[in-house]
Amino acid sequence: MQSEKETGLTVFHLVQPVEGGVARVVTDLARAQTEGGLRVIVACPPGGELAHAAARAGAKVLAWPASRAPGATLAAETRRVRRLVRHVQPEIIHAHSAKAGLAGRLAVRGTIPTVFQPHAWSFDAVSGATSTLALRWERYGARWANRVLCVSEAERRAGEIAGIHARWSVIRNGVDLRHFRPGGCEERSAARAVLPLLSQSTPQGPLVVCVGRLCRQKGQDVLLRAWPEVTAVTPTARLVLVGDGPDRAQLQATAPSGVLFAGSTQDIRPWLQAADLVVLPSRWEGMALAPLEAMACGRPVVVTDVSGARESLPPGQAAQCLVPPENPTALAKALGGLLTEPGALEAGGRLAHEHARTAFDVRRTTAEVTGLYQELLGRSRPLNQERISR
């Protein structure tokens, strides 16, 4: 590979995974940074939604074959990162999630300004000896990150409590308020009309939607255990799981009758606008994106008390909308309460939209990330106002 020589400051995003919230965060960054005059490279595994979305956002996409978990392929993945970095010659490396953070920091070892963004800590995702090894690595690898970027104060505190000594920044996730916007009864009816899965389902009662990868992290199994308690108080309520993942077959096998599986979708907005209530019963997060998107659409949310959840909710809503993780009874009580209390969904939706509009605009998020790059590079002028000769 020969080195590229072009003009424009180059940001190198190294990413694994390539779907879900992380993919949407990286796509938003790529779009904003490209529009701001930066040269954006996204290196990620081929396939999945990220490669196509990042390219549409204006980034140059490079293939980086990498599995989600560390293993025998790590050495080859790290060498590939090193070759890509030599080829691209970026001024900033921004590694997203555990695997990219591992390979990226091993590849450059602090020789280029590096931002590591965990998007939830790896040691929370595993148990036993694997969790111990993951934590040990995060403690050691922090020395090779000029900044560890957390998406919530809770995520940062969790890292500190775990003994990770890092140079921290906190920039909360944001959503595109031009894309995710509220709709009233007419929009809800229109959204339901274009979703065949809903028109075929009975009964036609209130709709609860859960958006997320079908995996242990997102806790859909807890929601399915809670659902019979919800329908005991609201018999016409319907539940749709939107997303795909490794646990789909198991979840379908254990789901109560009437629960719908929508599969993956390129645009979750119709499902959010069709919903009366959105739920995410995660076991761990950094700050989940789906609840922010739901609130931006004017939908109330019920979430579990994991990192970022309290910071996501409108002030004063924790008592009604926040439940302990892995607690089906508490989850059912919260869902049933909102579904049966007169006016609760409408009032909660209005409050949710106002909160998202004032606190989670993605334009502020992306501006703060670019400001962090500027700080690390020691530049006094905004990056989008300068061109650097390479």
Image (cartoon, rainbow, N blue to C red):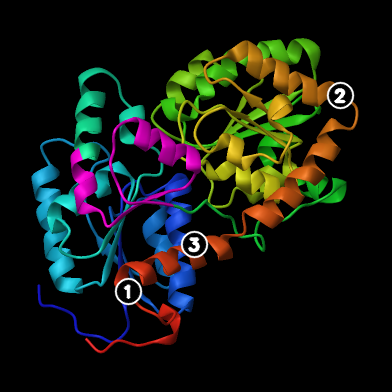
The residue beneath circle 1 is 378
Secondary structure under the numbered disc 2 in the rendered image: loop
The residue beneath circle 2 is 341
Checking the image for residue 28, the label placed there is 3
* Residue at 24 percent of width and 42 percent of height: 67
Could you tell me the amino acid type at mark 1?
Gly
Could you tell me the amino acid type at mark 2?
Glu
Q: Residues within 10 Å of mark 3 (few under 14, many from 20)?
A: many
Checking the image for residue 119, the label placed there is none
In the image, is residue 50 part of the stretch drawn in magenta?
Answer: no
Magenta region: which residues? 140-169
Residue 183 x/y as whole percent: 79, 51
Secondary structure under the numbered disc 3 in the rendered image: helix
Q: Earlier in the sequence, mark 2 or mark 1?
A: 2
Q: Is residue 283 visible?
A: yes
Q: Earlier in the sequence, mark 3 or mark 1?
A: 3
